[in-house]
Image (cartoon, grey):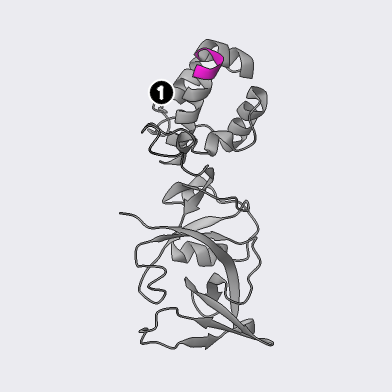
Amino acid sequence: MLIDELRRHNLAALSEEFGGVGKLSEHIGKDTSQVSQWLNGSINSGTGKPRGMRSSTCREIERKAGKPAGWLDTDHRAAASPFGANTGAGPAMHAPVPLISWVKAGDWCGVVDNFSPGDAEEWLPIPRAHGPNAYALRVRGVSMEPRYRDGSIIFVDPSKQADHGSNVVVRMDNEAEATFKQLVVEGDTKFLRALNPDWPGPKLIEINSSATICGVVIGQFIPD
């Protein structure tokens, strides 16, 4: 679910909780017509795209509605199971992160700032806590198989400490794109290791000052 769709879905739930669009609008201090446009995804005549809520507006609505920051950006559907007693509730979803390209990951490496909607292919909910600059990447190639398969999606957190054995996203100084390997620390020397035992390339690459660690992998999603 894209971020704008997720926000509309949660705003609809909030409207139901408050007893309708009118009562919600009154409570958060917004015009009923404005809230209705957000709920319906009315087309903006200037951009030709559905109207969405800015992040600052979402935080304002959450505050006035008594919800925690990021509530509108979180997928709450897993909290309730529609399949009866035989199926338990899924994990709680945290604020979604942007799915970006490997080039974009290299561009952002070391930049302390938030991603904007234009930086992402889409925004993906993640079932674990993460830092404010976390992001997602689609795995390419087989160097990290069998644990991380080609096409799977990894979630990366730049705020997490990279230690020996961490799976990390790294930008080499002479490369535009980031890469994905396991970090090996031997004394004062650092290496990148491919997990695939059949990988035909170098098994260990020394990095030290020749690379910048862009984040630690905190989870993955394997599409059907």
Which residue is the site of mark 1?
A: 40
Q: Position of residue 15 (x, y in %)?
A: 51, 19
Label 1: few (<14), some or many (≥20) within 10 Å? some
Dominant secondary structure of the residues highlighted in magenta in the image: helix
State the residue at coordinates (65%, 58%): 112
The x and y percentages for residue 63 are 67, 28
As shown in the figure, which amino acid type bears the numbered disc 1?
Answer: Asn
Q: Where is residue 98 in the image (x, y as percent from the top left)?
A: 49, 51
Q: What element carries label 1?
A: helix
The image quarter containing residue 84 is: top left
Q: Residue at x 51, y 50 (%)?
A: 97
Residue sitting farthest toward the right: 188
Decide if residue 78 is on the left or right side of residue 115: left
In the rendered structure, the answer to whether residue 97 lies left or right of residue 29 reads left
Residue 34 visible within the image: no
Name the residue nearer the viewer: 38 or 139. Answer: 139
Q: How many marks?
A: 1
Residue at the image position 58 percent from the left and 32 percent from the top: 58
Q: Is residue 109 above or below residue 113?
A: below
Position in image of residue 7 (x %, y %): 49, 33
Compare residues 44 and 66 and report the one nearer the observer: 66
Task: Give me the residue at 69% from left, 87% from top.
Answer: 188
The range drawn in magenta is 16-20
Identify the image quadrant of the N terminus: top left
Whether 224 is among the magenta residues is no
**Nearer to me, 130 or 2:** 130
Quadrant into which the C terminus falls: bottom left
